[in-house]
Image (cartoon, rainbow, N blue to C red):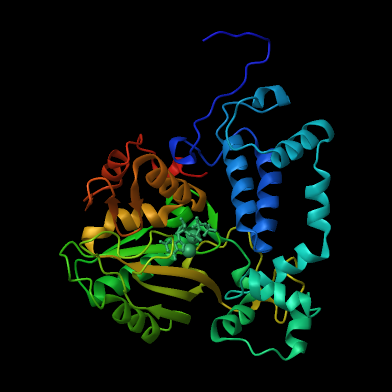
Amino acid sequence: LQVRSEVVAFSVPSYACQRRIALDHHNTVLADALSLLAENAELSDEDGRGVAFRRAAAVLKALPRQVTSMAQLKGLPCLGGHSLRVIKDVLDNGASDEVESTKRSERYKALKVLTGIFGVGAKTAARWISEGIHTLQQLQASGHTLNRAQQAGLEHYDDLNQPVTKAEADAIGEIVEKAVVSVLPGAQVTLTGGFRRGKLAGHDVDFLITHPEEGREEGLMPKVVSWLVKQGFLLYQKTTRNSYLESKDGPAQPPSNIDRFERCFSIFKLEKQATKQAEMPEDSCSFGTGGLCRRPAGHKPWRAVRVDLVVSPVSQFAFALLGWTGSKLFERELRRWAGYEKAMSLSSHALYDNNQGRYLRAASEEEIFAHLGLEYIPPSERNA
Ligand code: GTP
Ligand code: MN
Ligand code: MN
Protein backbone atom coordinates (compact mmCIF):
# COMPACT_ATOMS: atom_id res chain seq x y z
CA LEU A 1 0.00 0.00 0.00
CA GLN A 2 2.62 2.51 1.06
CA VAL A 3 6.07 3.09 -0.30
CA ARG A 4 8.22 3.76 2.73
CA SER A 5 11.56 4.07 0.98
CA GLU A 6 12.81 4.54 -2.58
CA VAL A 7 13.36 0.81 -2.89
CA VAL A 8 10.14 -1.09 -3.49
CA ALA A 9 10.51 -4.68 -2.35
CA PHE A 10 8.95 -7.29 -4.62
CA SER A 11 6.20 -9.58 -3.41
CA VAL A 12 5.70 -13.21 -4.44
CA PRO A 13 3.41 -15.94 -3.01
CA SER A 14 5.11 -18.77 -1.07
CA TYR A 15 4.37 -21.75 -3.30
CA ALA A 16 5.59 -21.92 -6.92
CA CYS A 17 2.19 -23.36 -7.91
CA GLN A 18 0.61 -20.02 -6.93
CA ARG A 19 2.79 -18.10 -9.42
CA ARG A 20 2.71 -17.63 -13.18
CA ILE A 21 6.19 -18.37 -14.49
CA ALA A 22 6.64 -18.05 -18.24
CA LEU A 23 9.70 -19.37 -20.07
CA ASP A 24 11.02 -15.83 -20.53
CA HIS A 25 11.59 -13.82 -17.40
CA HIS A 26 13.68 -10.89 -16.14
CA ASN A 27 16.36 -12.61 -14.07
CA THR A 28 18.01 -15.28 -16.18
CA VAL A 29 21.58 -14.61 -14.95
CA LEU A 30 20.58 -15.00 -11.29
CA ALA A 31 18.23 -17.93 -11.92
CA ASP A 32 20.87 -19.72 -14.01
CA ALA A 33 23.44 -19.30 -11.23
CA LEU A 34 21.09 -20.80 -8.64
CA SER A 35 19.96 -23.54 -11.04
CA LEU A 36 23.54 -24.63 -11.56
CA LEU A 37 24.00 -25.00 -7.81
CA ALA A 38 20.71 -26.92 -7.69
CA GLU A 39 21.91 -29.23 -10.44
CA ASN A 40 25.22 -29.77 -8.68
CA ALA A 41 23.41 -30.63 -5.43
CA GLU A 42 21.11 -33.09 -7.26
CA LEU A 43 24.07 -34.68 -9.01
CA SER A 44 25.72 -35.01 -5.60
CA ASP A 45 22.63 -36.82 -4.26
CA GLU A 46 21.76 -33.88 -1.99
CA ASP A 47 18.14 -33.43 -2.96
CA GLY A 48 17.25 -31.19 -0.01
CA ARG A 49 19.83 -28.61 -1.04
CA GLY A 50 18.80 -29.02 -4.66
CA VAL A 51 15.17 -28.19 -3.89
CA ALA A 52 16.20 -25.15 -1.81
CA PHE A 53 18.16 -23.72 -4.77
CA ARG A 54 15.35 -24.60 -7.22
CA ARG A 55 12.83 -22.80 -5.01
CA ALA A 56 15.07 -19.73 -4.79
CA ALA A 57 15.50 -19.70 -8.58
CA ALA A 58 11.73 -20.01 -9.06
CA VAL A 59 11.16 -16.90 -6.90
CA LEU A 60 13.53 -14.88 -9.08
CA LYS A 61 11.81 -16.17 -12.23
CA ALA A 62 8.49 -14.82 -10.93
CA LEU A 63 9.67 -11.23 -10.35
CA PRO A 64 8.17 -8.53 -12.59
CA ARG A 65 11.52 -6.79 -13.19
CA GLN A 66 15.25 -7.39 -13.07
CA VAL A 67 16.73 -7.42 -9.57
CA THR A 68 19.29 -4.64 -9.13
CA SER A 69 19.69 -4.42 -5.36
CA MET A 70 19.44 -6.76 -2.39
CA ALA A 71 16.90 -4.44 -0.77
CA GLN A 72 14.32 -5.41 -3.39
CA LEU A 73 14.44 -9.00 -2.08
CA LYS A 74 13.42 -8.14 1.47
CA GLY A 75 10.56 -10.35 2.66
CA LEU A 76 10.56 -12.68 -0.36
CA PRO A 77 9.93 -16.39 0.41
CA CYS A 78 12.37 -19.26 -0.25
CA LEU A 79 15.53 -17.13 -0.26
CA GLY A 80 17.85 -18.68 2.32
CA GLY A 81 21.19 -17.34 3.43
CA HIS A 82 23.13 -19.39 0.91
CA SER A 83 20.99 -18.29 -2.05
CA LEU A 84 21.15 -14.65 -0.91
CA ARG A 85 24.98 -14.83 -0.78
CA VAL A 86 25.05 -16.16 -4.33
CA ILE A 87 22.67 -13.42 -5.52
CA LYS A 88 24.73 -10.71 -3.80
CA ASP A 89 27.90 -12.05 -5.38
CA VAL A 90 26.34 -11.86 -8.84
CA LEU A 91 24.93 -8.35 -8.25
CA ASP A 92 28.25 -7.05 -6.85
CA ASN A 93 30.72 -8.85 -9.11
CA GLY A 94 28.80 -9.98 -12.17
CA ALA A 95 29.31 -13.64 -11.29
CA SER A 96 29.34 -15.97 -8.28
CA ASP A 97 32.69 -17.47 -7.23
CA GLU A 98 30.91 -20.57 -5.99
CA VAL A 99 29.10 -21.10 -9.28
CA GLU A 100 32.23 -20.51 -11.35
CA SER A 101 34.39 -22.83 -9.24
CA THR A 102 31.65 -25.50 -9.31
CA LYS A 103 31.53 -25.34 -13.11
CA ARG A 104 35.31 -25.76 -13.26
CA SER A 105 35.51 -28.56 -10.69
CA GLU A 106 36.59 -32.01 -11.84
CA ARG A 107 33.83 -33.61 -9.80
CA TYR A 108 31.03 -31.57 -11.38
CA LYS A 109 32.40 -32.16 -14.88
CA ALA A 110 32.70 -35.89 -14.27
CA LEU A 111 29.18 -36.09 -12.81
CA LYS A 112 27.83 -34.31 -15.90
CA VAL A 113 29.65 -36.61 -18.30
CA LEU A 114 28.67 -39.83 -16.51
CA THR A 115 25.03 -38.97 -15.74
CA GLY A 116 24.81 -37.89 -19.38
CA ILE A 117 24.63 -41.63 -20.04
CA PHE A 118 20.97 -42.70 -20.15
CA GLY A 119 20.43 -45.12 -17.24
CA VAL A 120 23.16 -43.64 -15.03
CA GLY A 121 22.01 -41.72 -11.95
CA ALA A 122 23.84 -39.69 -9.34
CA LYS A 123 24.62 -42.70 -7.11
CA THR A 124 26.19 -44.80 -9.88
CA ALA A 125 28.19 -41.83 -11.16
CA ALA A 126 29.49 -41.10 -7.65
CA ARG A 127 30.58 -44.72 -7.24
CA TRP A 128 32.48 -44.66 -10.53
CA ILE A 129 34.11 -41.32 -9.69
CA SER A 130 35.30 -42.77 -6.37
CA GLU A 131 37.06 -45.44 -8.45
CA GLY A 132 38.79 -42.73 -10.49
CA ILE A 133 36.47 -42.93 -13.51
CA HIS A 134 35.85 -39.41 -14.85
CA THR A 135 35.41 -39.91 -18.59
CA LEU A 136 33.61 -42.25 -20.98
CA GLN A 137 36.97 -43.61 -22.14
CA GLN A 138 37.91 -44.47 -18.54
CA LEU A 139 34.51 -46.10 -18.04
CA GLN A 140 34.92 -48.25 -21.13
CA ALA A 141 38.47 -49.19 -20.10
CA SER A 142 37.32 -50.10 -16.57
CA GLY A 143 35.51 -53.19 -17.75
CA HIS A 144 32.41 -52.39 -15.65
CA THR A 145 29.37 -54.40 -16.69
CA LEU A 146 26.68 -52.00 -17.86
CA ASN A 147 22.98 -52.80 -17.83
CA ARG A 148 20.93 -52.75 -21.04
CA ALA A 149 19.81 -49.13 -20.57
CA GLN A 150 23.35 -47.93 -19.90
CA GLN A 151 24.71 -49.81 -22.92
CA ALA A 152 22.13 -48.10 -25.12
CA GLY A 153 22.91 -44.80 -23.40
CA LEU A 154 26.60 -45.14 -24.17
CA GLU A 155 26.00 -46.26 -27.73
CA HIS A 156 23.80 -43.21 -28.47
CA TYR A 157 25.61 -40.81 -26.15
CA ASP A 158 26.16 -37.94 -28.58
CA ASP A 159 22.62 -38.04 -30.01
CA LEU A 160 21.00 -38.25 -26.58
CA ASN A 161 23.01 -35.28 -25.29
CA GLN A 162 21.93 -33.10 -28.18
CA PRO A 163 18.69 -31.26 -27.33
CA VAL A 164 15.52 -32.48 -29.03
CA THR A 165 13.85 -29.74 -31.10
CA LYS A 166 10.11 -29.04 -31.24
CA ALA A 167 10.14 -30.14 -34.91
CA GLU A 168 11.64 -33.48 -33.89
CA ALA A 169 9.11 -33.82 -31.07
CA ASP A 170 6.28 -33.22 -33.57
CA ALA A 171 7.73 -35.78 -36.02
CA ILE A 172 7.87 -38.38 -33.24
CA GLY A 173 4.36 -37.37 -32.20
CA GLU A 174 3.07 -38.32 -35.65
CA ILE A 175 4.75 -41.73 -35.43
CA VAL A 176 3.36 -42.39 -31.94
CA GLU A 177 -0.10 -41.28 -33.09
CA LYS A 178 0.05 -43.68 -36.03
CA ALA A 179 1.17 -46.56 -33.80
CA VAL A 180 -1.54 -45.88 -31.21
CA VAL A 181 -4.49 -45.58 -33.59
CA SER A 182 -3.28 -48.63 -35.54
CA VAL A 183 -3.52 -50.85 -32.47
CA LEU A 184 -6.50 -49.12 -30.82
CA PRO A 185 -8.73 -46.89 -32.95
CA GLY A 186 -10.09 -43.94 -30.98
CA ALA A 187 -7.13 -43.82 -28.58
CA GLN A 188 -5.68 -40.37 -28.01
CA VAL A 189 -2.09 -39.13 -27.75
CA THR A 190 -1.14 -35.94 -25.90
CA LEU A 191 2.28 -34.27 -25.87
CA THR A 192 3.25 -33.53 -22.25
CA GLY A 193 6.48 -32.54 -20.44
CA GLY A 194 8.47 -29.46 -21.35
CA PHE A 195 7.10 -29.21 -24.89
CA ARG A 196 3.56 -28.80 -23.53
CA ARG A 197 4.89 -25.91 -21.46
CA GLY A 198 6.08 -24.27 -24.65
CA LYS A 199 9.77 -25.17 -24.50
CA LEU A 200 11.47 -25.18 -27.90
CA ALA A 201 13.97 -27.89 -26.90
CA GLY A 202 14.08 -30.73 -24.40
CA HIS A 203 16.08 -33.71 -23.21
CA ASP A 204 13.32 -36.09 -24.30
CA VAL A 205 9.74 -36.17 -25.62
CA ASP A 206 6.88 -37.16 -23.29
CA PHE A 207 3.51 -38.55 -24.40
CA LEU A 208 0.38 -39.49 -22.49
CA ILE A 209 -1.99 -41.99 -24.10
CA THR A 210 -5.60 -42.70 -23.18
CA HIS A 211 -8.92 -43.91 -24.63
CA PRO A 212 -12.27 -42.14 -23.98
CA GLU A 213 -13.85 -45.45 -22.89
CA GLU A 214 -12.57 -46.55 -19.48
CA GLY A 215 -10.80 -49.91 -19.62
CA ARG A 216 -10.15 -49.92 -23.36
CA GLU A 217 -6.60 -48.66 -22.66
CA GLU A 218 -5.71 -51.83 -20.71
CA GLY A 219 -2.82 -53.72 -22.25
CA LEU A 220 -2.30 -50.99 -24.83
CA MET A 221 1.38 -50.32 -24.20
CA PRO A 222 2.78 -53.72 -25.26
CA LYS A 223 0.78 -53.48 -28.50
CA VAL A 224 2.03 -49.99 -29.25
CA VAL A 225 5.59 -51.03 -28.47
CA SER A 226 5.48 -54.11 -30.67
CA TRP A 227 4.02 -52.04 -33.55
CA LEU A 228 6.91 -49.58 -33.15
CA VAL A 229 9.48 -52.40 -32.93
CA LYS A 230 8.08 -54.08 -36.05
CA GLN A 231 8.34 -50.81 -37.99
CA GLY A 232 11.94 -50.36 -36.81
CA PHE A 233 11.33 -47.20 -34.79
CA LEU A 234 12.82 -48.34 -31.47
CA LEU A 235 16.51 -48.60 -30.59
CA TYR A 236 15.71 -49.42 -26.96
CA GLN A 237 12.61 -49.85 -24.83
CA LYS A 238 11.73 -50.89 -21.31
CA THR A 239 8.04 -51.27 -20.56
CA THR A 240 6.62 -51.50 -17.05
CA ARG A 241 3.11 -52.64 -16.24
CA ASN A 242 0.39 -50.70 -14.48
CA SER A 243 0.54 -51.39 -10.76
CA TYR A 244 -1.83 -48.76 -9.38
CA LEU A 245 -4.85 -49.86 -7.38
CA GLU A 246 -7.07 -47.25 -5.80
CA SER A 247 -7.97 -48.25 -2.27
CA LYS A 248 -11.27 -47.43 -0.58
CA ASP A 249 -9.45 -46.52 2.63
CA GLY A 250 -7.35 -43.77 1.11
CA PRO A 251 -4.34 -43.43 -1.10
CA ALA A 252 -3.12 -46.90 -1.92
CA GLN A 253 0.48 -45.71 -1.89
CA PRO A 254 2.04 -42.68 -0.33
CA PRO A 255 1.66 -39.87 -2.88
CA SER A 256 4.96 -39.34 -4.64
CA ASN A 257 6.27 -38.59 -8.06
CA ILE A 258 6.84 -42.30 -8.68
CA ASP A 259 3.66 -43.34 -10.44
CA ARG A 260 2.30 -46.71 -11.41
CA PHE A 261 0.99 -46.27 -14.92
CA GLU A 262 1.84 -48.56 -17.79
CA ARG A 263 4.87 -46.79 -19.12
CA CYS A 264 7.73 -47.15 -21.52
CA PHE A 265 11.16 -45.54 -21.42
CA SER A 266 12.44 -45.69 -24.96
CA ILE A 267 14.99 -44.53 -27.47
CA PHE A 268 13.51 -43.72 -30.86
CA LYS A 269 15.29 -43.96 -34.18
CA LEU A 270 14.21 -40.79 -35.97
CA GLU A 271 14.91 -40.47 -39.70
CA LYS A 272 16.52 -37.11 -40.32
CA GLN A 273 14.40 -36.41 -43.41
CA ALA A 274 11.39 -36.43 -41.13
CA THR A 275 12.33 -33.02 -39.76
CA LYS A 276 13.70 -29.83 -41.22
CA GLN A 277 17.49 -29.87 -40.87
CA ALA A 278 17.89 -26.18 -40.16
CA GLU A 279 20.88 -25.52 -37.95
CA MET A 280 22.85 -28.74 -37.84
CA PRO A 281 25.36 -29.20 -40.66
CA GLU A 282 25.46 -32.80 -41.90
CA ASP A 283 28.89 -33.67 -40.57
CA SER A 284 28.73 -31.85 -37.27
CA CYS A 285 29.68 -33.74 -34.17
CA SER A 286 28.88 -32.79 -30.60
CA PHE A 287 32.39 -32.60 -29.16
CA GLY A 288 31.13 -30.91 -26.03
CA THR A 289 29.48 -34.02 -24.62
CA GLY A 290 32.29 -35.78 -22.88
CA GLY A 291 34.79 -35.78 -25.69
CA LEU A 292 33.89 -39.20 -26.98
CA CYS A 293 33.01 -39.19 -30.62
CA ARG A 294 33.24 -42.73 -31.80
CA ARG A 295 31.72 -41.98 -35.16
CA PRO A 296 30.75 -38.62 -36.61
CA ALA A 297 27.10 -38.20 -35.70
CA GLY A 298 26.15 -36.64 -39.01
CA HIS A 299 27.15 -39.64 -41.15
CA LYS A 300 24.01 -41.60 -40.51
CA PRO A 301 20.56 -40.70 -41.82
CA TRP A 302 18.88 -40.91 -38.41
CA ARG A 303 19.32 -39.80 -34.83
CA ALA A 304 18.45 -41.33 -31.46
CA VAL A 305 15.85 -39.52 -29.29
CA ARG A 306 14.67 -40.34 -25.77
CA VAL A 307 10.90 -40.80 -25.62
CA ASP A 308 8.66 -41.47 -22.59
CA LEU A 309 5.26 -43.06 -23.18
CA VAL A 310 2.61 -43.34 -20.47
CA VAL A 311 -0.86 -44.93 -20.70
CA SER A 312 -3.59 -43.65 -18.38
CA PRO A 313 -7.21 -44.73 -17.92
CA VAL A 314 -9.45 -41.81 -18.89
CA SER A 315 -10.74 -41.48 -15.30
CA GLN A 316 -7.19 -40.56 -14.21
CA PHE A 317 -6.26 -38.61 -17.33
CA ALA A 318 -6.48 -35.10 -15.85
CA PHE A 319 -4.23 -36.12 -12.94
CA ALA A 320 -1.77 -37.82 -15.27
CA LEU A 321 -1.72 -34.81 -17.61
CA LEU A 322 -1.11 -32.42 -14.71
CA GLY A 323 1.56 -34.73 -13.27
CA TRP A 324 3.45 -35.23 -16.53
CA THR A 325 3.42 -31.62 -17.72
CA GLY A 326 5.82 -30.40 -15.06
CA SER A 327 7.97 -28.57 -14.36
CA LYS A 328 9.36 -30.91 -11.72
CA LEU A 329 9.43 -28.09 -9.16
CA PHE A 330 5.88 -27.03 -10.07
CA GLU A 331 4.72 -30.64 -9.43
CA ARG A 332 6.56 -30.85 -6.15
CA GLU A 333 5.05 -27.55 -5.02
CA LEU A 334 1.53 -28.68 -6.00
CA ARG A 335 1.91 -31.79 -3.83
CA ARG A 336 3.36 -29.72 -0.97
CA TRP A 337 0.48 -27.23 -1.25
CA ALA A 338 -2.06 -30.06 -1.29
CA GLY A 339 -0.58 -31.73 1.78
CA TYR A 340 0.29 -28.76 3.99
CA GLU A 341 -2.41 -26.27 3.06
CA LYS A 342 -5.36 -28.53 2.17
CA ALA A 343 -4.73 -31.87 3.93
CA MET A 344 -5.03 -33.56 0.54
CA SER A 345 -2.80 -36.10 -1.22
CA LEU A 346 -2.13 -35.38 -4.90
CA SER A 347 -0.54 -37.90 -7.25
CA SER A 348 -0.55 -38.46 -11.01
CA HIS A 349 -3.48 -40.82 -10.41
CA ALA A 350 -5.81 -39.10 -8.00
CA LEU A 351 -6.53 -36.44 -5.39
CA TYR A 352 -7.51 -37.67 -1.93
CA ASP A 353 -9.13 -35.38 0.64
CA ASN A 354 -7.97 -36.53 4.08
CA ASN A 355 -10.61 -34.48 5.92
CA GLN A 356 -13.53 -35.78 3.88
CA GLY A 357 -11.99 -39.25 3.63
CA ARG A 358 -12.67 -39.54 -0.10
CA TYR A 359 -11.20 -39.13 -3.55
CA LEU A 360 -12.09 -35.96 -5.49
CA ARG A 361 -12.86 -36.63 -9.15
CA ALA A 362 -11.69 -34.34 -11.92
CA ALA A 363 -12.13 -34.42 -15.69
CA SER A 364 -9.78 -31.51 -16.39
CA GLU A 365 -6.72 -29.79 -14.96
CA GLU A 366 -8.92 -26.76 -14.21
CA GLU A 367 -11.04 -28.89 -11.87
CA ILE A 368 -7.96 -30.12 -10.01
CA PHE A 369 -6.74 -26.56 -9.41
CA ALA A 370 -10.26 -25.69 -8.22
CA HIS A 371 -10.32 -28.65 -5.77
CA LEU A 372 -6.97 -27.44 -4.46
CA GLY A 373 -8.22 -23.88 -4.02
CA LEU A 374 -5.62 -22.59 -6.48
CA GLU A 375 -6.00 -20.16 -9.36
CA TYR A 376 -5.65 -22.07 -12.63
CA ILE A 377 -2.15 -21.80 -14.13
CA PRO A 378 -1.89 -22.78 -17.82
CA PRO A 379 0.99 -25.07 -18.91
CA SER A 380 3.00 -22.21 -20.47
CA GLU A 381 3.16 -20.57 -17.03
CA ARG A 382 4.22 -23.67 -15.08
CA ASN A 383 7.89 -23.13 -15.90
CA ALA A 384 9.00 -22.85 -12.26
P1 GTP B 1 12.97 -31.88 -20.47
O1 GTP B 1 12.55 -33.24 -20.86
O2 GTP B 1 14.33 -31.87 -19.87
O3 GTP B 1 12.83 -30.88 -21.54
O4 GTP B 1 12.01 -31.36 -19.29
P2 GTP B 1 10.66 -32.00 -18.79
O5 GTP B 1 10.00 -31.00 -17.93
O6 GTP B 1 9.87 -32.56 -19.92
O7 GTP B 1 11.17 -33.15 -17.82
P3 GTP B 1 10.91 -34.73 -17.83
O8 GTP B 1 10.75 -35.28 -19.18
O9 GTP B 1 12.00 -35.30 -16.98
O10 GTP B 1 9.57 -34.89 -17.02
C1 GTP B 1 8.34 -34.37 -17.46
C2 GTP B 1 7.38 -34.39 -16.33
O11 GTP B 1 7.06 -35.72 -16.00
C3 GTP B 1 7.93 -33.74 -15.06
O12 GTP B 1 6.93 -32.96 -14.47
C4 GTP B 1 8.24 -34.88 -14.16
O13 GTP B 1 8.01 -34.55 -12.82
C5 GTP B 1 7.27 -35.93 -14.63
N1 GTP B 1 7.81 -37.26 -14.44
C6 GTP B 1 8.98 -37.77 -14.85
N2 GTP B 1 9.11 -39.03 -14.45
C7 GTP B 1 7.99 -39.32 -13.78
C8 GTP B 1 7.50 -40.49 -13.12
O14 GTP B 1 8.13 -41.53 -13.04
N3 GTP B 1 6.25 -40.39 -12.60
C9 GTP B 1 5.50 -39.26 -12.66
N4 GTP B 1 4.29 -39.21 -12.12
N5 GTP B 1 5.95 -38.15 -13.26
C10 GTP B 1 7.16 -38.20 -13.79
MN1 MN C 1 10.61 -34.20 -21.01
MN1 MN D 1 10.51 -37.52 -19.61
Res 116 visible: no
Q: Is residue 298 above or below residue 324?
A: below
Where is residue 27 drawn, in percent x and y? 65, 35
Where is residue 315 drawn, in percent x and y? 21, 59
Between 202 and 216, the residue placed more toward the observer is 216
Res 4 visible: yes
Residue 62 left/right relative to 102: left
Where is residue 229 drawn, in percent x and y? 39, 84
Q: Is residue 275 above or below residue 75?
A: below
Q: Is residue 30 above or below residue 114?
A: above
Q: Residue at x 26, y 69 (%)?
A: 245
Q: Is residue 2 above or below residue 367?
A: above
Residue 150 left/right relative to 139: left
Image-quadrant location for residue 85: top right
Residue 310 left/right relative to 304: left
Where is residue 141 drawn, in percent x and y? 77, 88
Total marks in image: 0
Q: Residue furthest left?
A: 213
Image-quadrant location for residue 186: bottom left
Between 181 and 207, the residue placed more toward the observer is 207
Q: Residue at x 65, y 24 (%)?
A: 74
Between 181 and 376, the residue placed more toward the observer is 376
Q: Residue at x 70, y 65 (%)?
A: 112
Residue 247 left/right relative to 238: left
Q: Residue at x 62, y 40 (%)?
A: 56
